[in-house]
Image (tube, helix red, strand yellow):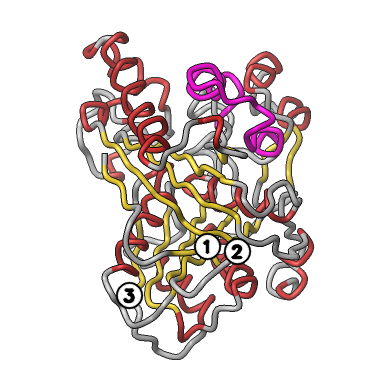
Amino acid sequence: MDGYETGAPLFVAGCASWLPPAVSTEQAVAAGEVTARDATRTGMTSVTVSTGQSAPEMAALAARVALRRADCPPQDVGLVLHASLYDQGHDLWAPASYVQRRALGELPVHAPAMEVKQVSNGGMASLELAAAYLRAGTDRPAALLTSGDVFAPPAFRRWTSDPGTVYADGGAALVLSREGGFAQLLGHFTASEPRLEGMHRGDAPFAPEASGLRRVVDLDRCKREFLAGTGRAAAVAWVGGGQRRTLVDGLASLGLDVGGVARFVLPHLGGRRLAATYFQPFGIAPEQSTWPWSRSIGHLGGGDQFAGLAHLVETKQVGPGDRVALVGVGAGFSWSCAVVEVLTCPDWAVSDTWADDAEDSPGVRTGG
């Protein structure tokens, strides 16, 4: 496990999500996207679905809101990291540079813009990378972190490509700063277990996309093939060990336990998966987490944690002195946990995430 809790203090200065309208579970069942039984098992009430906007577009819109909330001018940004899980809309293209241009403006800036491909843990990975970058002494005080994904059929079936998790479209962003913010980053921790990388690969041979091999995403099949060779007991032990090292040992290094955390921003998994991986093993109450909200949004790839923290602040569910744990997991496998302490209560409203940019994005709303 790797963790950084010392050195120059860092702060979350702003965060936001940009989410398209939601499609209800009942609508998805009626459309034949999922059976009523499988939909009920997830516990989801709806999922956000883009009807035209791309992943990088929504990431850039979320970034503009986060920068505005942080009162962070473009010249203060020394690093742009864009995390994504799925296709970004163009081949041989740099979505991070697009986000940089749309969020910071057209003029050249002396700040690298890079993409982070750590699947569902991409946002948390970018937080760890940005913290190290800012502590290394770059002359600009802030880093802009974004995430954006659209999970479009026919190649990706948001309800069934990964049974137990419903995949949502949307963008999210966070501004990390050395110069202050509404919350202080107390520590961040990551564990990795490469013996699990095959769980999302399965037995299919490596082949170019043009070959047509397994073009429809079927993570359940990959998992079955992996477990047939590895064994369920070993895989469960590796997963449980990674989660515990990150969450329990990470909190303990800060002198905390689960009871010392006011709210948990958990990955937007389905209810059964959250119960099996977080609620039951660690004694986290569902209402102590973002599940009551995330069940109406769905899994935003690497953006769950940024969007979840923004939601807690927008809805005044956290206040000064509250410690919030941002928890992530991604195929590979990697697990991350970051703990922030809320210092002030920003006067953010859900509506402020779209009002100034409505011209760019007609019909788009935030989740709230």
Task: Please tell me whether mark 2 sits on a helix, a strand or a loop.
Answer: loop
Which of disc 1 and disc 2 is earlier in sequence? 1
- Residue that label 2 marks: 182
Q: Amino acid at mark 2?
A: Phe
Instruction: Name above or below for residue 244 compared with residue 330.
Output: above
User: Which stretch is magenta?
Assistant: 269-296
Q: Disc 2, disc 1: CB below 8 Å? A: yes
- Residue that label 1 marks: 12
Camera-side residue of 95 and 230:
230
Q: Which residue is rendered at x = 39% and y = 86% of the image?
A: 109
Residue 79 among those drawn in magenta: no
Q: Amino acid at mark 3?
A: Pro
Camera-side residue of 18 and 187:
187
Percent across and percent down for residue 28 are 71, 31
Which of disc 3 and disc 2 is earlier in sequence? 3
- Location of the N terminus (image quadrant): top left
Relative placement, left or right, of 356 versus 137 is: right
Instruction: Name above or below for residue 67 compared with residue 337.
Output: below
The residues tagged by marks 2 and 3 sit, at their Cα atoms, a distance apart of: 25 Å
The residues tagged by marks 2 and 1 sit, at their Cα atoms, a distance apart of: 6 Å
- When asked about the image quadrant of residue 220, the answer is top left
Q: How many marks on residues?
A: 3
- Residue that label 3 marks: 112
Camera-side residue of 264 and 311:
264
Q: Which residue is rendered at x = 32% and y = 75% of the image?
A: 112
Relative placement, left or right, of 197 versus 66 is: left
Q: Amino acid at mark 1?
A: Val
Instruction: Name above or below for residue 8 compared with residue 278.
Output: below
Task: Please tell me whether mark 1 sits on a helix, a strand or a loop.
Answer: strand
- When asked about the image quadrant of residue 288, the answer is top right
Q: Is residue 306 visible to us here?
A: yes
Point out the frontmost of discs 3 and 1: 1
